[in-house]
Amino acid sequence: MGKDELLQNPVLGIFFKTIDISVNRDSKISAFKAFKQAGENLEKGMSLVIFPEGKIDDHYPPKLGEFKNGPFRLAIDKNIPLVPVSITNVWKINWDDGAKYGSKPGICDIYVHKPINTSVLADVDADGLKEKVFKLIDSKLV
């Protein structure tokens, strides 16, 4: 799931059209349709990767942005376990599109956290789940 502007990228656009769900971040209807499609894909047994901040901040070096609620409600509604992932240093290799700070080859450090069971949660638990995942991911970014 990603911003629909990626469809315009000549390289990423090819992959994005075939495997990703695009979202116009300025449209609530687009967001609703994207999450409906994501739910259908989950029901088919497909995996889903969501960056819950919903944007790349302009702050350099980056700080983890506030998470949106949708991914957590979706996981609870579909009884799908969450696997939080911290990607700790990709910003040092390629900041956004590389235009301002450049990019270089390198190795990204990735920490895969233990899965979180959502089958015992209800919609009212979405905010708590969101906070828990935020703290887990952020704990490895220091």
Image (tube, rainbow, N blue to C red):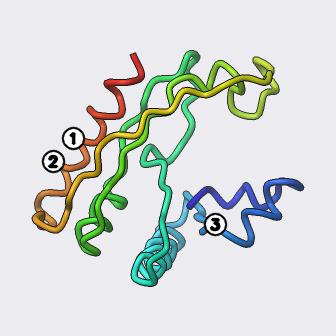
User: Residue at position x 31%, y 24% from top?
Assistant: 139
- Give the secondary structure at mark 1: helix
Distance between mark 1 and mark 3 Cα atoms? 26 Å
Question: Which quarter shows the C terminus?
Answer: top left
1 and 3 marks in contact (CB < 8 Å):
no
Q: Position of residue 79 (x, y in %)?
A: 24, 71
3 and 2 marks in contact (CB < 8 Å):
no
- Give the secondary structure at mark 2: helix
Q: Is residue 51 left or right of residue 118?
A: right
Q: Residues within 10 Å of mark 1 (few under 14, many from 20)?
A: some
Which of 78 and 68 lies nearest the eye of the viewer?
Answer: 78
Distance between mark 1 and mark 2 Cα atoms? 6 Å
* Mark sitting earlier along the chain (1/3): 3
Query: Which amino acid, mark 3?
Result: Asp
User: Residue at position x 46%, y 24% from top?
Assistant: 63
Distance between mark 3 and mark 2 Cα atoms? 28 Å
- Give the secondary structure at mark 3: loop
Can you tell which mark lies on residue 132? 1
Q: Is residue 48 left or right of residue 16?
A: left
Query: Which amino acid, mark 1?
Result: Lys
Q: Position of residue 12 (x, y in %)?
A: 79, 55
Q: Quadrant of residue 18?
A: bottom right
Residue hosting label 3: 20
Q: Is residue 85 left or right of residue 20?
A: left
Q: Residues within 10 Å of mark 2 (few under 14, many from 20)?
A: few
Can you tell which mark lies on residue 128? 2
Q: Position of residue 128 (x, y in %)?
A: 15, 47
1 and 2 marks in contact (CB < 8 Å):
yes
* Mark sitting earlier along the chain (3/2): 3
Query: Which amino acid, mark 2?
Result: Gly
User: Residue at position x 44%, y 78% from top?
Assistant: 45
Can you tell which mark lies on residue 91? none
